[in-house]
Amino acid sequence: MNKSQKNIDKIVNVIKDANLPQTEFVKLMETFHDPFKVLICCILSLRTNDKTTYPCSVRMLELGQTPQDFLKVDEDTLVKAIYPVGFYKNKAGQILDISKELVEKHNGKVPQSIDELVKFKGVGRKTANLVMAKGFGIPAICVDVHVHRISNRLGWVKTNTPDETEMALRKLLPEKYWLDINTILVTFGQNICKPQRPLCDKCPVKEYCESFLK
């Protein structure tokens, strides 16, 4: 194991203790503990930054809180509520289709299974894992662009895709961190370990980072 892998506990806890500011969308997702709300808000967030996603999520949730509520929502109304998230028309259709399928085939309940969740249109492993972790409180590793980028930069993994990163982290990362690792690394990625021009001089874990030490 390299230095970064050997010090995972220290790295995770140092980042947590840094108390970096969270976006309003991240804070909102942390309050839900509801798989349906996590699911539909995660769909909104795909390919859209948190600053845009947050107000759209709030407006969407004013229209409904459950799959049954969204059966009564007109698609044009939902489109207007979630604009300007990326692909807002497609996402409105996906959310309404999923709501209908949940009511008709799952008694209005979100399936408690990654394999079942990824069967829904527009739901990939990232979204499914977030629903498991934040919606059901079941340990699962949600790998988005931040988690993928940072895990590779630190030297925890050497992978080419988020799905590969998820599988590698499942073997490496202690399960006690699975529920919160997405929130921890997303916040770290938005504040310090940015996609372009990461703030390495301000990084609290640079002494363990393979990219910095090269």
Image (cartoon, rainbow, N blue to C red):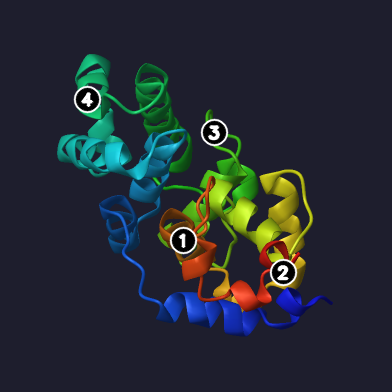
Which is nearer the eye, 48 or 136? 48
Q: Check if mark 1's residue and mark 4's residue have beta carbons within 8 Å.
A: no
Dot 3 or dot 4, earlier in sequence: 4
Dot 2 or dot 1, earlier in sequence: 1
**Location of residue 135 by image quarter:** bottom left
**Mark 1 sits on what residue?**
192
**Mark 4 sits on what residue?**
73
Q: Where residue 123 sits: x, y (%)?
A: 54, 36
Crowding around mark 4 (Cα neighbors within 10 Å: few <14, some 14 to 19, many 20+) is few
Dot 4 or dot 2, earlier in sequence: 4
Quick check: 54 above or below 203?
above
Which element is circle 4 on? loop
Crowding around mark 3 (Cα neighbors within 10 Å: few <14, some 14 to 19, many 20+) is some
Q: Amino acid at mark 1?
A: Ile
Q: Which mark is residue 120?
A: 3
Residue visible at 28% across and 62% down in the picture: 31
**Mark 2 sits on what residue?**
213
- Mark yes or no: residue 17 visible: yes
Distance CA(mark 2)–CA(mark 3): 42 Å
Dot 1 or dot 4, earlier in sequence: 4
Quick check: 199 above or below 95?
below
Observer-side mark, 4 or 2, equals 2
